[in-house]
Image (cartoon, helix red, strand yellow):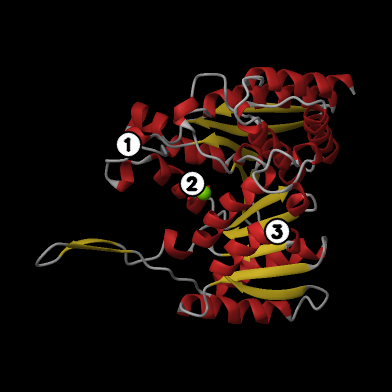
Amino acid sequence: MKKYNIALLPGDGIGPEITKVTKKLLQTISNKHDFEIKFEEHLIGGTAIDETGNPLPNETIEACRNSDGVLMAAIGNPRFDKLPREKRPETGLLKLRSDLNLFANIRPVKIFPSLVNSSTLKSEIIENVDLIVVRELTGGIYFGQPKGRIKTEKSERAFNTMSYSTEEIRRISKIAFELSSNRKKRICSVDKANVLDVSQLWRDEVNKISLDFPQVELTHMYVDNAAMQLVKEPSQFDVILTGNLFGDILSDEAAMLTGSIGMLASASLNIDGPGLYEPVHGSAPDIAGQNKANPIAMILSASMMLRIGLNENDAADDIEQAVNSVLDKGHRTSDLIGKSNDYLGCDQIGEKINDAIQAK
Ligand code: IPM
Ligand code: MG
């Protein structure tokens, strides 16, 4: 029987609740599809700071490196917002991405048919949306040097650097072109080349890579226009290729097309080595511990892990079909239901999905 070692990182806020539900589903699915998953839980984010003083203890990095896949829930807690940057939860996640060289972040945005009316946008605008944001994840302004704060004569100045090398642009572009070759064969590369030098290099290099993929149609769009087009006519997009900061912003915007950011999964990948699978949403401290969170983004992240990382495609299909059928039956979590009180808790929707997997 195949055995996989999964590093499980529950993190902060709603993280532990959605992890519990997702872990249980993975156990059900592995029994059903005849493989074994060994889970090892590790600390990251605010919980890790509280226990060890460090948002990403070495032991966590090592365990992730030696795993077959890393499944993370969410990190972040406003309690730490005033601390120096190296002591904040987000720094732990950024270091994990960087240490494992997870340069390719894949964020699929697909509308579940039964949720077309949960979006704040009109159903005719979103019903055909099926796009993927390919976000560069280990470069750009998130990691560029120099950065910092300096005292000036009168006050203070702070700065970050948005920088990309040819190699960084090429490797993420290749991933986007390969993905797109198996889809609708359309890439829209998003930049700000009308203003930024770094974006002009981005555009030049993406153009060069496109020569190796003549079957894929490449267009370019400025990020301000892309933000507008995503709400105006989102179905025009197939693969959106973009840098770290623009990808962060546009993927939250794209998430809302699906009705809730609680639905969006992601995979962060290297050329080889274990990937990191995590929901796009954050730790939602305002609803933590209340059994109100939507676990579906983490469940779908687990299904991306099964598909991309472990090659267990049938198990991944099974999870996605179960989520679909539970939504089709009208079950909703609080984020999907607007003001009504008639929603299922995190545990309860998890049970429904679990039942749907077992029933098939
Ligand atoms: C995301 C998040 C992270 C990011 C934060 C938590 C550091 O917003 O994964 O999109 O900015 O990349
Ligand atoms: Mg984000």
- The number of numbered badges drawn on the structure is 3
Query: Which residue is at the far left?
Result: 153
Q: How far apart are marks 2 and 1 (CA)?
A: 19 Å
State the residue at coordinates (41%, 37%).
Answer: 57
Judged by depth in the image, the label closer to the viewer, 3 or 1, is: 3
Q: Residue 37, image x and y in percent?
A: 70, 28
Which amino acid lies under the numbered mark 3 shown in the image of this protein? Pro
Looking at the image, is 113 positioned above or below residue 345?
Answer: below
Judged by depth in the image, the label closer to the viewer, 3 or 2, is: 3
Residue 189 at least partly seen = yes
Which amino acid lies under the numbered mark 1 shown in the image of this protein? Phe
Q: Quadrant of residue 187?
A: bottom right
**Label 1: how many Cα within 10 Å (few below 14, some 14–19, many 20+):** some
Looking at the image, which is closer to me, 126 or 201? 126
Give the mark, 3 or 1, whose residue is nearer the N terminus: 1
Instruction: Give the residue pinned by disc 1.
Output: 80
Q: How far apart are marks 3 and 1 (CA)?
A: 36 Å
- Give SS at disc 3: helix
- Give SS at disc 1: helix
Give the mark, 3 or 2, whose residue is nearer the N terminus: 2
- Give SS at disc 2: helix
State the residue at coordinates (78%, 26%).
Answer: 330
Which amino acid lies under the numbered mark 2 shown in the image of this protein? Leu
Instruction: Give the residue pinned by disc 3.
Output: 234
Q: Residue 22, image x and y in percent?
A: 66, 27
Classify mark 2 as within 8 Å of ligand 1 or not, answering yes or no. Answer: no
Looking at the image, is 220 positioned above or below residue 294?
Answer: below
Classify mark 1 as within 8 Å of ligand 1 or not, answering yes or no. Answer: no
Residue 67 at least partly seen = no
The label on residue 96 is: 2
Looking at the image, is 194 positioned above or below residue 81?
Answer: below
